[in-house]
Amino acid sequence: MNLINKRNHNRSRLLGISLFIGALFCAFVAMTEQAFSEIPRGVFCLLGAGEGTGRDSLVYSDPDVDGIGMRQKWADLEPAEGVYDWTYLDNVIARAAAAGKAVLLRIGTGGGDIALGGSCPTWVMDAVAAEPLPASQKFYTFNHNGRSVTIAVFWDPVWLAKKTAMITALGARYSNNPAVKIVGASFANANTEDWGVPNTPPEVAAWLNAGYTSARMLDAGSQIINATMAAFPNQYVTLAVGTNGHTGHGPNLDPDANYVARNAVLDARASWPGRLIVQKDSLATYIPAAPGTGSPWELLWNSGPDVAGQMLYWCYGDTTYRVNRGVPIDPSTALVNSVNKGVAYGMKYIEIYRRDVLNLLAATHYAHTALSSVGGALVTDFNSDGHPDYVLQNAGTRQTAIVYLNNNIVIGAALGPTLMAGWALRGVADFNLDSHPDYALFAANTFQTAIWYLSGPTFIGSAVGPTLPSGWELVATADFNGDGHPDWVIRHAATGQTVLVYMNNNLVIGAAFGPTLPNGWSLAGVADFNGDGHPDYALFIAGTGQTVIGYLSGPTVIGAALGPTLPSGWALVATADFNSDGHPDYLLYNPASRQTAIWYLNNNIAIDAAFGPTLPAGWSLVG
């Protein structure tokens, strides 16, 4: 199927449309670009060290994957001093760039000598050993899962010199690559790139004997972070934070458990404003609820809004249930509940293990939607019987399907067109006024839009829509100016600002700024809740399940009301009048069970509910 049938829509017309929208947003876009490009949002597929070059094609083509978290051991990158093997990094970054995915680049330096199971090159450990210092002042040995691990102390000058030289070489090769958006930094990482400072009483005593001080740690942190910032002036730098332990009776390494991490963050943000992301690499179902007062997670909350996370472990196939503290749980439920915890802390992105991305498709889609805040599912009346129908998508094949409903009951189904790679379905409405809903498509890597004209489920033609300014995305469609033509809601990913783009079929005829969405909230639906003839915004925040209705008159907010709070594991994904009472209702979705449900509303009040169909495996509500 040809994606675009240009017919009467020539390139000069497209250029004019792009310039029109660009002029509308020029001041706002300039303001955001001066601040720094926005932090990528959504799901980052966390690859294992050295993975991503062979069997990962689905990862790169998955529309629910927003970025690639890639890892390589330092020893594999720099097997001899000053001799770099760029093969792996070049390969994965090129694949991600071709797929329009952001890259989070991380080099593993923890765990000691590569020859003994760690990530550090043997030649680095040999260089540290050659220093004219007692071994007790330059090496530290601890036990990790039954393995004796020896590392260079974090502040050792030779260790720091070799590591910062590697960072500088890394930046020289990749700082100008636009696909590389984020680079990991670590300086208190005994075993992995996560924060890890062994802190049992015997381990604390050994650290103190080796010369540990808080000042030495902060100086080491400054050297690593400064080197990374300088080597990568075009990227964000992310630092995984944690605690160094603290007891009331001592001995203790620092004045309090978060002292080093907290002050490293403060110093870095003072020196490099707007550049540092703070993240926690232990996201799980059982972490304290935001804001985590009195817990190690309070630092993340206090470090917002530029915060992110990484799953503690994978959920699929883990018979130890690590993300649920050993208690058996459905893997999709575990991932969804963990994501909800992360969203409540305001995480911009979450690194989810490759195994879960490939096997927990519905939960990954949920995570993508909750984190990217791009809107919810798509429902409208495709068979002209007066009842809204579902649009589904198969994540693996990009095939769409229409499920015909009578209220909450399935009465039929039909396959719709298959989406092209790189394109997402973001709206359904009758753009050419032939009484049949059409697809509104958006390509995130080019910001191009398109309309696929349908007759029922059948593709009958297409047209190019406007190209959006960089950083903006199409999130919803509705007639906001009452001219009978569906309009577009577009949203700036970094700021949450919305704009109503007034359309006549595929042509822009005007635009106006709409409300700015609060951080973490998604636009789940657009419908007239108060019956005044103007579409309103239905908002949802996954972390708490709270909903809000923002009442609009055209682009202007005229009021707001709390809607019902959803149970844990459920998301608000669309709004439509399912029971034909003249009031829009909520469509809910549970990605763990693939169950749908309808909450019948009168304005913002829930008055009844019913289960809808359970979706087939591999299929999800799209939006």
Image (cartoon, grey):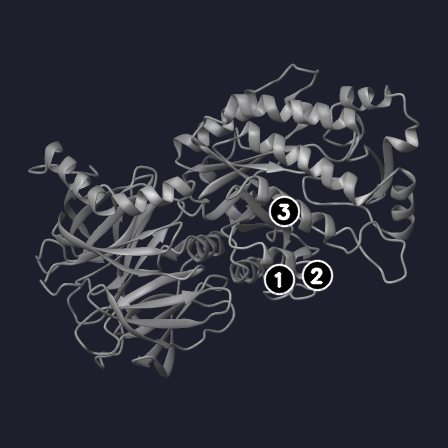
Please tell me whether residue 461 is drawn above or below residue 485 in the rendered image: above
| In contact (CB < 8 Å): disc 1 and disc 2 | yes
- Res. 325 mark: 2
Q: Nearer the viewer, residue 164 or 122?
A: 164
Please tell me whether residue 209 is drawn above or below residue 511 in the rendered image: above
Residue 418 appears in the picture as rendered: no
Q: Is residue 250 left or right of residue 114?
A: right
- Res. 265 mark: 3
**Disc 1 and disc 2: Cα gap in Å?**
8 Å
The residue sitting at 59% across, 65% down in the picture is: 290
The residue sitting at 39% across, 77% down in the picture is: 562
Q: Amino acid at mark 1?
A: Thr
Q: Earlier in the sequence, mark 1 or mark 2?
A: 1
**Disc 3 and disc 1: Cα gap in Å?**
26 Å
Q: Position of residue 312 (x, y in %)?
A: 65, 51
**Disc 2 and disc 3: Cα gap in Å?**
29 Å
Q: Is residue 319 left or right of residue 397?
A: right
Q: Position of residue 605 (x, y in %)?
A: 35, 82
- Res. 63 mark: none
Element carrying mark 2: loop
Q: Nearer the viewer, residue 189 or 463?
A: 189
Residue 320 appears in the picture as rendered: yes
Q: Amino acid at mark 2?
A: Arg
Q: Position of residue 130 (x, y in %)?
A: 86, 19
Q: Amino acid at mark 3?
A: Val
Quadrant where the C terminus sits is bottom left
The residue sitting at 58% across, 40% down in the picture is: 271
The residue to which callout 1 is attached is 285
Q: Quadrant of residue 29?
A: top left
Q: Earlier in the sequence, mark 3 or mark 1?
A: 3
